[in-house]
Image (cartoon, coloured by chain):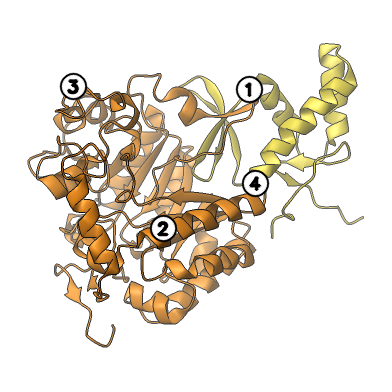
Amino acid sequence: MAGPRHISVNEASRPVLPRHAKLKYDETRKVWVILAPERVLAPDEIAVEVLQLCNGERSVGDVSDQLAAKYAAPREAILADVITMLQDLADKGFLTEAREKTP
Amino acid sequence: MTDVLGNPPPPSDSLAVLEKQRSTAEAFGIPLAVLLEITHRCPLQCPYCSNPVELDRAGKELTTDEWKKVLSELAEIGVLQVHFSGGEPTARKDLVELVKHASDVGLYTNLITSAVLLTREKLGELADAGLCHVQISFQGIEEGLADRVAGYKGGHRKKLEVAKWTRELDLPLTVNAVMHRQNLHQLPDIIQMSIDLDADRLEVANVQYYGWALKNRAALMPTVAQLDECTRLVEEARERLKGTLAIDYVVPDYYALRPKKCMGGWGRQFFNISPAGKVLPCHAAESITGLEFESVRSNHSIAWIWQNSEAFNRYRGTGWMKEPCKSCEFREIDFGGCRCQAFALTGDAANTDPACALSPLHETIFKQAEAEAEGETNRFLYRNFAGGTLESENGT
């Protein structure tokens, strides 16, 4: 079964797109898209970059660290933006969290 | 069936809905999603079936290779999603092969099914083939009514089972509930059933009255009071279930003052392909007599048919309009409503859809629908290849 509903994204979350939400570059329209049931979303450049880093292993904090370093920007501001974007995706039902690995 | 990609939630800053953003800006760019009605065969006999009254028989259906060629061509010209529908798409033995091919060429695949022919093994094969999403139709909340509407004994129970398998296989599930006078009282329970089934989406789709549904209008038309209650329930549930269950809502247009922007406008953002390979501006378009629809079996490419064929261009834009549409301030907003409904109710697809209050026929049709809704006729004309069978006096 998929993860629980009502995912609340925070710094420790390790989110990933579920199998039914596919990030893809649309060659015809030259834009990135997220394909989901009966929906085609058009993420902006930053959202694409965040989603490419979200592999279910990196935490939201890790992702924010990487982006802060890359853009030499304040980490707190980036973290807030990343959480907002991911929470929006989660509320639409297009985000899941990696299951805890059994040691 | 809702408008494909219709009714999206409001886009946030970083995640816009592509259909909203582009389709009207680009002059008839290729649609993002295409409906494939791969067969008209179906074990169910729902009296509101969206298929044409004149069904394509099995012998006319495109072959496996022809559908594969269609899928490759769609991916190549920029279509991103396909909906495998019917009829009942699982009635085709090659469905797994077609889903596999669609996935291989990069298409996102949806299955729109009655579910009654599926086994757990078959659903697993479809998931392995890359199927992304399953949409199951429900006719009610309990088998007495649901099986009677579908004209298929044991159907409801099977649907519940398949819905469970769908979630066990980690596939997202949409419950498609087609609503009408005889089942609208079950809507609160249908919403709860969707939650219990762990569905991601619920489509509350009021019957649209063309084809089979028009023949059954007297048995299906809801009352104004029922519809008001339905809208209230949907709005309340949407708020309460935000983030848990997305609810799409298709309203019947008979009681509206303004017509719906059917299909997002004729030939603007949608086409479907019939079992025999006709490329159509809407799944009911073949009901408009006098229009010639081109086939994927012709010498023309699908992109050419979309852009250049006479049938697609006939009602594109606003140039074809007559009064009161022609000078109406809403003409670019609703494009005069639904061409199939205009044809069915007025005999001319270029007339204003009578769902619009500005149509001279609106008043008459509204009164007729209201009278039918209050009437005693509950017997169905079941959908089949023989032109329909009337329900017996005691049901079924």
Residue closer to the observer: A65 or A91: A91
Label ID, residue A93: 4
Q: In the image, is B51 to the left or to the right of B245?
A: left
Which residue is drawn at the image coordinates 18% and 75% (left, top)? B389
Mark 4 near mark 2, Cβ–Cβ under 8 Å? Answer: no
> Of helix, strand and loop, which one carries label 3?
loop
Mark 3 near mark 4, Cβ–Cβ under 8 Å? Answer: no
**Amino acid found under the numbered disc labelled 4:** Gly
**Amino acid found under the numbered disc labelled 3:** Gly
Relative to B340, say whether B14 is above or below: above
Name the quadrant containing residue B143: bottom left
The picture places residue B339, in percent across and down from the top left corner, at 21, 40
Q: Nearer the viewer, mark 1 or mark 3?
A: 3
Label ID, residue B367: none
Q: Residues within 10 Å of mark 1 (few under 14, many from 20)?
A: some
Which residue is drawn at the image coordinates 67% and 38% (left, top)? A89
The colour chain B appears in is orange
> Of helix, strand and loop, which one carries label 2?
helix
Label 4 marks a residue whose chain is: A
- Cα–Cα span, label 3 and label 2: 35 Å
